[in-house]
Amino acid sequence: MSKLRLLKTGHGDLCLAEWDVAQPQTVGEAQRAFAEHFTPGRLAFRLDGPGKTRPIREFDATAPEILLVPAIQGG
């Protein structure tokens, strides 16, 4: 089962959705959650294991895990 997670600054992370490509309804729900939470100022990463992370700009149902993070701002 693949996961879509949202990193919450100072609060850990929140699992927004889980999907299985063999169950199309779960993919649709995860796709909608991605669209809702991938807002300006956030970045999305496909996590394929240690050292195998790459940025993405749209939902990828083949990803084992997707992490949404707030953009880091300097000060």
Image (spheres, rainbow, N blue to C red):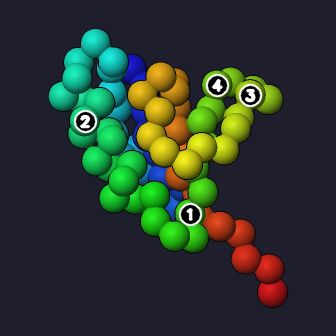
| Outermost residue to the bottom | 75
Whole-Å distance between the Cαs marked 3 and 2? Answer: 25 Å
Q: Is residue 44 left or right of residue 5?
A: right
The CA span between labels 2 and 1 is 21 Å
Q: Is 9 rendered above or below residue 66?
A: below
- Residue 13 appears in the picture as rendered: no
- Where does residue 66 sit, x and y in percent of width and height? 52, 38
In the image, which disc is placed on residue 52?
A: 3
Q: CA distance from mark 4 to mark 3?
A: 5 Å
- Asked which secondary structure carries label 1, the reply is strand
Q: Which mark is residue 28?
A: 2
**Total labels drawn:** 4
The amino acid marked with disc number 1 is: Arg
What residue is drawn where x is 47% and y is 33%?
A: 60
Foreground disc of the pair 4, 2: 2
| Amino acid residing under circle 3 | Lys
Residue 42 is left or right of residue 31, and the answer is: right
The tag on residue 42 is: 1
Horizontally, is 34 left or right of 23 in the view?
right
Q: Residue furthest front?
A: 57
Q: Earlier in the sequence, mark 4 or mark 1?
A: 1
Label 4, on which residue? 48
Quarter of the image where the N terminus is located: top left
